Image: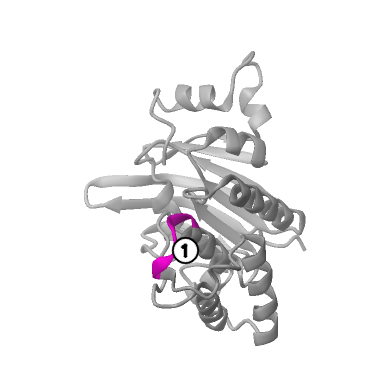
Amino acid sequence: MESAPPLRIESLTHRYGDLLAVDDLSLEVGAGEIVGFLGPNGAGKTTTLRVCAGLLALEKGRVTIAGADLAATPLLARARLGLVPDEPFLYERLTPAEFLEFVAALYDVPESLAALRSSELIERFELVAAAGELIETCSRGMRQKVSIAAALLHDPPLALLDEPLTGLDPRAVRALKDLLRERAARGLGVLVSTHLLEVAERLCDRVVIIHRGKKRAAGTPAALLAGRAEATLEDVFLALTGDAEPAS
C-alpha cells in the first residue's frame, strides 16, 4: 500500500471576516519533494501554512500531515510537522541550547538523541559560539537559525518554512539549502514559502503559485517555463499575478 504524502491540502478555504484569504486551495507535497510556495503580498501563503500548522482554525477543507488528519487527530498531525514561522517565536530568557532542549522535550525526543541532533544543528548553523548566550542577545539571523533548528529537531516527515532565508548570511543559506536537499533525499517533504524566485527555481522540485488565495499554476520550474523562450520563473510569476511584486 502506498504511504501517505507528507502533506495533502484539499479545498482549503479561510476567511478573515469578509476577506477571503485562501480560496478552495488544493496542493500536495510528495515524499522526497521540495515544493516552493510562491505569491505576492496577501496571496494567502502565510495563512495556509498557519492553518496547516494548527495555528489558525481549519474552517473548510481537509489537511492531512503524513496521513494524520488535522481535524480528527490534531495533536498527531502537528507532531508530524516542523514549522519555521515568518517571525521566530522563541523564549528569549533561554539560551539556544536550552531552547532546543525544551523543544525536544515537547516532542518526546529521547534525551540522548535530542542531544545528538541539537549538537549537529548547532554546529551546522554555526551557533556554537552563541549556544550559551541568552536568545534576547542574539541577532535576527541567529534567531532565525535557532528557529530552523527547533523546527527540524524532532525530524518530522514535513517541514513548513515561511520565508526561512530572512536574516541569514550566505553560509547559513547554503547550510539550509543543503539540509533541505538531504531531507528530501531521505523521503521527507518540504513546503517553502519564499519571495526569492531565483532560489525557488534552483532549489525546488515543483512550485505552486497562488494569487488572491487561489492557485494560479503548479508544476516543475521547467514545465512552467516550457514554450517561453529565455523566460525566467520571475517572468511567469509576474504574468500570473498581474505584475504584483514578488514578495511574501
Looking at the image, residue 170 lies above or below residue 131: above
Residue topped by disc 1: 53
Q: Quadrant of residue 233?
A: top right
| Residue at (38% x, 28% y) in the render | 244
Q: Quadrant of residue 246?
A: top left
Of residues 139 and 203, the one drawn nearer to the viewer in this rendering:
139
Q: How many marks?
A: 1
Of residues 174 and 198, the one drawn nearer to the viewer in this rendering:
174
Say which quadrant the C terminus sits in: top left
For the question of whether residue 36 can be seen, the reply is: yes
Q: Look at label 1 and name its amino acid.
A: Ala
| Residue at (36% x, 59% y) in the render | 59
Q: Is residue 73 left or right of residue 203?
A: left
Please report the bounds of the magenta region as a residue range: 136-141
Looking at the image, residue 226 lies above or below residue 19: above
Image location of residue 198, percent across then percent down: 58, 32
Of residues 212 and 184, the one drawn nearer to the viewer in this rendering:
184
Residue 138, magenta (yes or no): yes
For the question of whether residue 156 can be seen, the reply is: no
